[in-house]
Image (cartoon, rainbow, N blue to C red):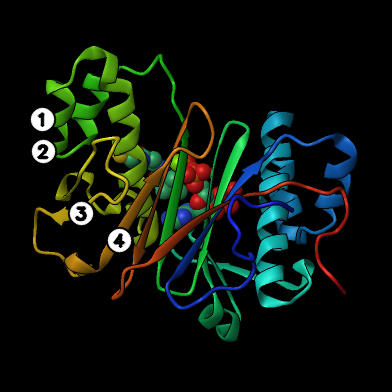
């Protein structure tokens, strides 16, 4: 496995948030190996996908999630047990592991993103920038007023960039709190400007979610994709991006 920076992965310091960018299309031989890491429930879920491509990507994302968490926790990936909150957010069932790491996963087309940290609840989102999106129309439907204002005022050449910056940031926050879309997208506002790497979040209605505690980080994981992460943290987190590269061998030690 390679990573972009010199820091050793798999060791989380107190304020670290590690972001793993993961290619989801792998050769069939490798996928055969990866599927053996999944639990019976995950294998059952994989069988339910209609398209092979979606099934394959789900398998790779889940297997990489297990592999990475296994590395941070020094546990074999197969031994990890996931629970799910009412809205489907996965967490580690073991209270000991829960204290050691929190995580979240996202996928879009052939890329996945996994965020791992000890700082607090985390949400991540990755999205392929699709030029077919009607940015203004969808933005007006889903975004908060200040976000729509930025989008509407932008020249058409910048709209897609702003739209997907806004979308990934909002979704990362929604995923961090783990309540899905029961938390209204109109009740909070983020800075959607693409050049803002650490966008601020503001609640537009009184919220129990702790306004000043949310820290966001936005980045371009690979060409043509946007990504964002949101964490609830008292201290300023240190965000680090790693690119996962399979060696073809099991990247953990027994
Ligand atoms: N909270 C956080 N994470 C969740 C979750 C929840 N309630 N439910 C599932 N997840 C995790 C899972 O690991 C899931 O992947 P898996 O099933 O392969 O393990 C992963 O998040 C899915 O995230 P992503 O790939 O980003 O999918 P999505 O964009 O299709 O769905 C959810 C995002 C999970 C929040 C979905 O419930 C949802 O509400 N989607 C609506 C999207 C939207 O309108 N966003 C608004 C942006 S302005
Ligand atoms: Mg998403």
| Cβ–Cβ under 8 Å for marks 3 and 2 | no
Left or right, 133 with reference to 71: left
- The kind of secondary structure element at disc 2 is helix
Task: Let me know if residue 98 appears in the view.
Answer: yes
- The kind of secondary structure element at disc 4 is strand
Task: Let me know if residue 178 appears in the view.
Answer: no
| Cβ–Cβ under 8 Å for marks 3 and 4 | no
Determine which residue is flagged by label 1: 149
Left or right, 210 with reference to 251: left
Q: Position of residue 124 (x, y in %)?
A: 44, 52
Above or below residue 14? Residue 46 is above
Q: CA distance from mark 1 to mark 3?
A: 16 Å
Determine which residue is flagged by label 2: 146
- Marks 4 and 1, the one that precedes in the sequence: 1
Q: Position of residue 118 (x, y in %)?
A: 48, 74
- Marks 3 and 2, the one that precedes in the sequence: 2
Q: Position of residue 2 (x, y in %)?
A: 70, 51
């Amino acid at each position: 496995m390679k990573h972009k920076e010199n820091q050793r992965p798999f060791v989380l310091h107190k304020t670290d948030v590690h972001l793993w960018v993961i290619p989801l299309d792998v050769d069939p031989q490798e996928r055969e190996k990866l599927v053996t890491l999944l639990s019976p429930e995950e294998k059952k879920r994989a069988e339910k996908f209609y398209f092979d491509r979606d099934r394959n990507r789900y398998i790779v994302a889940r297997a990489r999630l297990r592999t990475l968490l296994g590395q941070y926790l020094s546990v074999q990936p197969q031994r990890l047990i996931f629970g799910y909150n009412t809205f489907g957010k996965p967490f580690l069932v073991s209270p000991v592991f829960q204290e050691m790491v929190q995580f979240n996963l996202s996928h879009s087309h052939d890329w996945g993103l996994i965020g791992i940290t000890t700082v607090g609840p985390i949400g991540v989102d990755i999205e392929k920038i699709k030029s077919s999106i009607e940015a203004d129309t969808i933005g007006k439907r889903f975004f908060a007023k200040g976000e729509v204002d930025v989008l509407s005022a932008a020249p058409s050449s910048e709209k897609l960039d702003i739209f997907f910056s806004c979308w990934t940031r909002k979704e990362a926050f929604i995923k961090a709190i783990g309540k899905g879309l029961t938390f209204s997208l109109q009740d909070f506002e983020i800075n959607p400007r693409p050049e803002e790497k650490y966008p601020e979040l503001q609640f537009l209605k009184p919220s129990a979610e702790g306004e000043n505690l949310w820290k966001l980080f936005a980045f371009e994981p690979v060409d043509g994709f946007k990504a964002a992460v949101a964490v609830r943290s008292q201290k300023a987190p240190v965000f680090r991006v790693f690119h996962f590269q399979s060696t073809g061998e099991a990247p953990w030690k027994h």
